Image: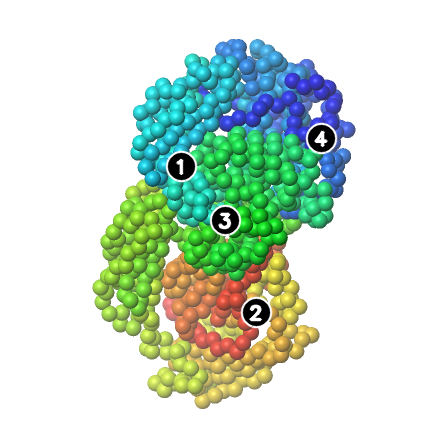
Amino acid sequence: MTNLSTSDVRYVEDRSPGNGRLAPRSSFTSDSVHLDFNGPWRFRIAAGLADLTPAFEDPAFDDSQWELIPVPSNWQLQGVGAPAYTNVAYPFPIDPPRVPDANPTGEYRREFDLPSQWPDVRSVLRFEGVDSCFAIWLNGMRLGDGKGSRLPTEFDASDALKPGRNVLAVRVHQWSAGSYLEDQDMWWLSGIFRPVRLLARHPQSVDDFFVHADYDHLTGSGELVVETTGDGAPDCRLSVPELGLLDVDPAGPHTIADVTAWTAEQPHLYHGELVTPHERIPVRIGFRRVTVEGGLLKANGRPILLRGVNRHEWDPETGRTLSHETMLRDVLLMKQHNINAVRTSHYPPSTEFLDLCDEFGLWVIDECDLETHGFELVGWRGNPSGDIRWRDAFLDRMQRMVERDKNHPSIIMWSLGNESGTGENLAAMAAWTRTRDPDRPIHYEGDWDSGYVDVYSRMYADHAETEQIGRAQEPVTEDPALDAHRRTLPFILCEYAHAMGNGPGGLSEYQKLFETHPRLQGGFVWEWIDHGIARRTDDGRVCFAYGGDFGEPLHDGNFVADGLVLPDRTPSPGLIEYKKVIEPVAIDVDPIAGTVHVRNGHDFRSTAHLRFSWQAEDDGETVLDGRLDVPDLAPGESVTLPQPRLPDARGRERTLTVVAALARPEPWAGAGHEVAWGQAVLTPAQHPAAAPGIHQTEASPDPGRRSVPALRDSTGHVLGPGRFDAATGQLTRLGGLELTGPRLELWRAPTDNDRLGSRLADQWHALGLHRMTHKCLGIDSTRDGLKVTSRVAAAGTDAAMDTTYHWRTDGHELWLTLSVTPHGEWPCPLPRLGLHLELPSWIDTVDWYGRGPGEAYRDTASAARLGRFRRSVDDMQTHYLRPQENGNRHQVRRATLTGVGGTLQITGAPHFDLTVSRWSAADLAAARHASDLLPRDRVHLHLDAAHHGIGTASCGPATLPQHTLHTRPTVFRIALSSSILSEDTGLPGE
Ligand code: IPT
């Protein structure tokens, strides 16, 4: 109980973590009675503290005219006020601990009947999460107030609770002193967004318990100690039947020979119960030992490799209120995509999520609800981390997280928070944590000296620096003691590979470093999900909003959309790429040695749960397949096996693909789920007959495949099936197919990685790549075809591309050799180099033989395997929140575009990159949301010799040098043919 009067609102701007709260403790369920207050509450929004409803806490207050709001929820997603997004900047003046007068305040009221059988014991009101500050009254009696949005708060309700009707009143302020500590890169959302419960706590029960379940990897034994607190602790007994423990003293210690350890790979949980005469509390025990020894982060004595993601809690409809199904979906998707670790950026998640991590197996870095990043914009002046007046608030947040979550075996590290600079308050958090839970290492990224942490952690270090750290050759810190300490630490990238929009590129290069240098123990991709907010367009289509869409005066646009899954949890191509890059079994098919090399990259698990199979394909057609007998490999073990005996490929492109799939169902995926694969081309294609012309070079045309010369008529030039415009020399018809182009195209709709960080897109814009003009310099009928030369350049500049289109034909196919020679200065990498064609809109399906099935660019192509694929044009698009270049298919050998009108065939020499869409690059670049893109009356086809790599410059390193598209003379060859159905007969026409 507090002695603050009802109208006293000083707590809002006071640095203290709260008043009248109970000591923090773990979250657990039991058979003790409780009431759930989820569901509709009466609600009114006040504009600020001057607008509060007088006596709203009075049980007699008539709220019947008030609206209803669901609890839990964020009120901005219930049509009250509006979401606002900023990344680093505070959306209010930096004047701690003061907050704006415009401080939307939700007044919540809820009546409930206390069941007649409610025991006459202590009753505790528990709020799992309220953003950002709140005060509560029960039956007009003020119980207290609290801050720390993503942490639980409990109040003793015993004195205020009555039999029969009770009235609970809660005032929630959008802004408070606590907001200065909650500057995470996410939407600012408010309200009671996690559950509220009333718990009956019998005085003779336990208040709290702490499970210590240590695993000794040398002996295989476990030691179990369960500390209990509360008046009932002396009478508390523990039973874990599977361990042979029945009604024992929880404190033990109980040494159990031969326990099954808990790991993220095999998350064995023992189910037990703490029993007092008045209560049964289920406990789940996972035996494991986490240590930092010899410069390595180890679990159960073995170094682990973190294949992680940063996860914010997000649902596009309900914001930070997540259903159980949604949390489960996240965990299943992660497991299915080979992810083994989660950093709960940047606050403790709902405990249900941690339960799922315990159950399905994910290593967790549990991060405190703390970020003061906005102070960086004022040179860290006044940063709370170094200000003693905030000490209690910092410590309180850490204590509430550690106490709440200490019994989750999945948690292997405590993180002090994110981006809060440096300061003594952080050191104090670490010191307290070390005493309270010596069994878990401490993480914090913001202090590179790493004085008070157990792992060296960084974000977005580029490949070169990461490698330097891997070799323990990072630059020396000023303080020799700190330097010496840091050098003993293992390294993780707590954030890397910014998954904003198209990308991230460069993942496989990072993984290679992690797998090469033992000190590099992996990382956490930024981030799991795009925080798009679902909205409906006027015509009923779902579209996802991002920063600025709610009229925020200060915002960071679509920087809030940087996830591996789209807001509706559709895996983005980035997730598919990540799954492949981090696969726990490496399969290398070696075409030269004729072998298949399999290495088990699991940290704990053998390969006994996997079944290996192989498939040989010629030009994408299966010729033979079978099982591959891979012996059971222990972690780290590998084997080299001979390839299956195969018939001669007879000039076709022969691939061998080996797949490792689950032999039996796992809790997170069914039998047959693919875990890893490897593929190689065993014999390259030899196409002299199949694709004439396209293998000839200018210097040595194939004499056996001579082209016919071009003819001239009144409308232009005719070469075999091709008709060319008399003025531009451009192809206008291919057989019966009307088309425009192909014309040289250098530009793509900038990706987020092109736009931000490197600002490449600005340079492309300055060069005028998006407005190039084509000047025809000559159309010459040659002995073997048609030669069209042109100069491609933008207004206002003298940089140009001299372009020659050399067309030849066998009377059926058109063979194009495009030669491009740069002229003048080209100061930056090109976005793309290729051809753009416009085709009739009846084209709706694409079949191709090349890499697929998904989107891939040169530095995001690990997951794209060679094969035959079919997609509708609509399904070839990736709907990134902010439209941008997307949907490329990499190294395509052959493609057929079809629709009711007929087909267009494209053959590469040897291959090309392919995008097909119902809008142009300019449409994509102009659109702000996916819903802005409406199908045009033409299908846009891009056939590219190359794209610039994707990189991850939106936050992190730019495209690696080896994936850079330099401007240099280029020759690109394709062959085109069409077969068109005549409108009258439906039979092949012209
Ligand atoms: C880093 C933040 O920790 C994270 O919350 C997110 O904002 C991410 O960047 C980018 O999306 S901080 C950044 C300045 C390196």
Q: Sequence-wise, which precedes: disc 2 or disc 4?
A: 4
- Point 52% across, 81% down: residue: 804
Compare residues 294 and 210 and report the one nearer the observer. Answer: 294
Residue type (three-letter) at the residue carrying disc 2: Leu
**Residue 14, numbered circle:** 4
Q: For residue 671, which quarter of the picture?
A: top left
Q: Quadrant of the C terminus?
A: bottom left
Residue 589 shown left or right of residue 497 in the figure:
left
**Residue 830, numbered circle:** 2
Front label number (2 vs 1): 1
In percent of width and height, residue 531 lies at 57, 45
- Point 50% across, 23% down: residue: 208
Q: Sequence-wise, which precedes: disc 3 or disc 1?
A: 1
Q: Quadrant of the N terminus?
A: top right
User: Is residue 625 shown above or below 440?
Assistant: below
Give the alpha-carbon distance from disc 2 to disc 1, as whole Å: 51 Å
**Residue 488, numbered circle:** 3
Q: Secondary structure at mark 2?
A: loop
What residue is shown with label 1? 288
Residue type (three-letter) at the residue carrying disc 1: Arg
Tell whether label 4 touches label 3 (CB within 8 Å). Answer: no
In percent of width and height, residue 828 lies at 60, 70
- Point 51% across, 11% down: residue: 119
Give the alpha-carbon distance from disc 3 to disc 1, as whole Å: 23 Å
